[in-house]
Image (cartoon, helix red, strand yellow):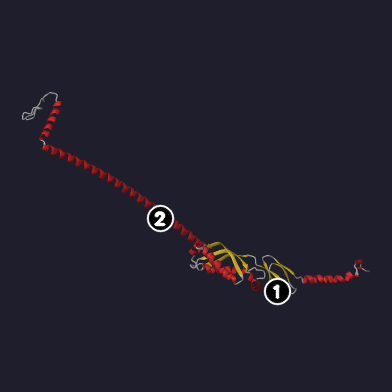
Amino acid sequence: MKNPLSAAIPSSLKTALPVVIVGVVVVWICWPFYSVPTGSRGVVTQFGRIVGIEGEGLAILPPWQKLSNFSIRAEKADVEEADGSTSDTQPVRVSMTVRYSIATDKVAEVFEKYSHDGDLSSYVQTATQEVFKAVTAKYTAPDLIAERAKVSADIGEALKMKLALYGAQVINIDMRNFAFSDSYMHAINDKVTQEQLRLAAENKLKTVEAEQKQKVAIAEAEANAKKAEADGEAYASLAIAKAQAEALRVQNAALAQNRDVLELRRIEVEKAKADKWNGQLPTAIYAGAPIPFLNVTK
């Protein structure tokens, strides 16, 4: 019994159908059009050998060649707990993120030797560990803390040279969780505490010294003021004494030159006494005592 469906298909179509199927398979196998996405390069191989590098966009290849997309975008490699040792044998560890990319002129070399897709994270992690050990061994622990920026720069320069061997170029390095052993960190904290206490004691001593100097300055100023006051008083007393002596000298000189002045003074005194006398004689007179205002010798 004949199949109704096969009977409905024209004989010419039945003959062309296998040819069409074979043609589709051939085109699918021998499709010559390829696309290289942005941020990539197309590595063209022929029977396993690299024969060319295609840029971004459309690439047309013969069927005996193959195109592999190779990323040249920025990639990153996380390096966790990289450990090293300082020149004074202090263990140190750090975590880092290294961003890198494949140099465009090294695509064929990297594809051939290291990676078919541009991922070199395993190489970057190993190289970073080695570089970190080498760089930290050049510094003492205190210098490693004080010069962290320089340490990071040294690691970056060494890593650039190291990764250049793999055809990669370093974009930047982020260091984090930079730390020493717990015992060393405790020792650092104790040292910092002692230093702070020492500075506080020095500041207190300077304050006390300043206060003492201030008190001495005040005492000296008060002493100088009292001395100046005493000197002033002494000078004034001396000036007064000199003036009084000069006055007496002048009076004595005047009296020596004019005896009448002395007599006049005596008369003035006697007159002052007479003005004050009440006219009564003393009731008791001892032998030889003068009677007021009766000088019988004159």
Q: Quadrant of residue 241?
A: top left
Between residue 296 and residue 123, name the one nearer to us: 296
Q: Secondary structure at mark 2?
A: helix
Position of the N terminus, as image quadrant, is bottom right
Q: Position of residue 245 (x, y in %)?
A: 17, 41
- Along the horizontal axis of the image, is 274 left or right of 49? left
Q: Residue at left 23%, top 44%? A: 235
Q: Position of residue 36 (x, y in %)?
A: 70, 67
Q: Disc 2 versus disc 1: distance between alpha carbons?
A: 76 Å
Mark 2 vs mark 1, foreground winner is 1
- Along the horizontal axis of the image, is 166 left or right of 232? right
Q: Which mark is residue 29?
A: none
Q: Residues within 10 Å of mark 2 (few under 14, many from 20)?
A: few
Q: Residue at left 19%, top 42%? A: 242
* Residue linked to disc 1: 45
- Along the horizontal axis of the image, is 290 left or right of 116? left
Q: Secondary structure at mark 1?
A: strand
Q: Residue at left 13%, top 37%? A: 254
Q: Kindly check if marks 2 and 1 are in contact, taking CB atoms under 8 A apart as contact.
A: no
Circle 2: residue type:
Glu
Of pointers 2 and 1, the one earlier in the residue sequence: 1
Q: Residue furthest front?
A: 257
Q: Position of residue 49 (x, y in %)?
A: 69, 76
Q: Residues within 10 Å of mark 1 (few under 14, many from 20)?
A: some
Q: Residue at left 88%, top 71%? A: 15
* Residue linked to disc 2: 202
Circle 1: residue type:
Thr
Between residue 272 and residue 119, name the one nearer to us: 272
Position of the C terminus, as image quadrant, is top left
Q: Residue furthest top?
A: 279
